[in-house]
Image (cartoon, grey):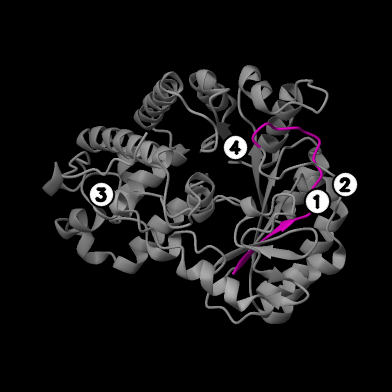
Amino acid sequence: MDVILHLTHDCQLDCAYCYGGRKRARAMSWEVAQRAIDLIFDQPSTEPAPQIGFFGGEPLLELPLLRQCVAYAEAKSAATGKPFRTVITTNGLGLDDGIAEYLKLKQIEPTLSFDGVAAAQDASRPYPDGASSFADTRQAMLTLLRHFPDPIICAVVSPENVRCLPDTIDFFMEAGIRRLLLNPNFFADWDEPHLDLWRQGYEHAARRFEEEFRGGRVMHLNFITTKIVTHLKGGYDPWECCDFGLKEIAVAPSGNIYPCQRMVGEDTEQLGLMGNVFTGFIEQTCKALADGREVTSPECLECDLRRRCRNWCSCVNHRLTGRFDRTGPLVCFHERMAIEIADRVASALFAEKNATFMETFYFEKHADPEWV
Amino acid sequence: MKLKPVSHYSGARYPRLADYLAKSTRGRTLSTVGLAIALAALLSLLAGCGNMNGSVA
């Protein structure tokens, strides 16, 4: 089981789409963090390397606690013989070379939340006084690039910034980013003109992706790479889908346990509350969550793309449709678009027997003569 | 906007890995398990905190 620790509800930014709710200086106590880490090390698990994720709010605001958690997890790992992975999602504003060096030393893989060019970043990720966070976040990206060969950037795509998407993709690629997550804001109001801009942005990304492979350079864009892989292997495997509390849990600063980090919010609504690190899991809720996560939309069941579709994200489903087991039309639109574009790109690169593509996705540089 | 199920999809004109390897001389020497691990690793390249398999929402 993996655990995501919400080290604090606080953050330096005031992002329009944040699902964390109102920002406040409420940090996780050491006792809560310790019990949460115990949960993943003390449970019998067949998974060899549980993951600890640092999240928030902004987790670097609680750096001493983060360091304490890492040291504790290292000690637990040494005592139990279980290895672990650590990741962090950060806005980068507290990052400097010393912290980046620490993250590297401890093999904590960073994901930087950064929406792209100034117009995109400022559309949704300002400081509370409305000031731009672009220059500071760009600086954080450059700091990460000095210490990590291949940091992940997570950019939210929303109607407010989708017009900038081509520029944003170019901006990240020119900076040297090779792993880019375009994270759709499914909860925004998307009208037809903005859906068209979204497609245009993805088409631009696809062209850049092809160009990179033709130039012998590997890059990964989530909506293309994941859809290519799901074709290659015949769909998502069950263990790759969200298990909604079975494989990954999120722990709020209070110690409350949720099935997903998106459901922690302000920790007041308590939708999907699964328990608390001090009192344990609420069995009835866990069972209800597990039973209700299978997608049952009739349209999905008859769709040819169902095994490659990520309609299994229960928290997105609930927010869009009020049900964990029913996905929304915007997810359907996105998945059809992503699969169509990814398949077109992959079909072209395969037809060309592109060596970089073949090596990345078929694990051999030169196409087998049978397929030439 | 509504859910739009897709039928008779034929957009992927590149082979599944298993089909590719079945025709490949090299495929006979590679283990299925090893390839499954390699593909899973590709997905995990894009997995960060709270974005399982790069499939964020």
Q: Which residues are magenta?
A: A1-17
Q: Which residue is mark 2?
A: A25
Which chain letter goes with mark 1?
Answer: A
Q: Is residue A15 above or below residue A6?
A: above
The disc, 3 or 4, on the residue closer to the chain's N-terminal end is 4
Which chain is indicated by disc 3? A
Check the image and report above or below for A280 versus A63. Answer: below
Q: What secondary structure predominates along the stretch shown in magenta?
A: loop
Give the numbered dot on residue B1: none
Q: Position of residue A264 (x, y in %)?
A: 68, 54
Residue A301 vs A290, above or below: the answer is above
Query: What is the spatial separation of the Cα atoms under label 4 and label 1, in whole angstroms?
Result: 21 Å
Q: CA distance from mark 3 to mark 1?
A: 41 Å
Residue annotated with mark 1? A8
Residue wearing tag 4:
A153
Quarter of the rendering containing residue A145: top right
Residue at mark 3 shares a chain with residue at mark 1: yes
Please rate how many residues cluster around mark 3, counting C-alpha atoms within 10 Å: few if below 14, some from 14 to 19, many from 20.
some
Q: Considering the numbered disc 1 on the image, is that residue within a helix, a strand or a loop? A: loop
Q: Chain of mark 4?
A: A
Task: Give coordinates of residue A202: x percent, y percent.
Answer: 41, 28
Task: Give the CA distance from mark 3 to mark 2.
Answer: 46 Å
* Residue A93 in view: yes
Residue appearing at x 61%, y 62% in the figure: A272
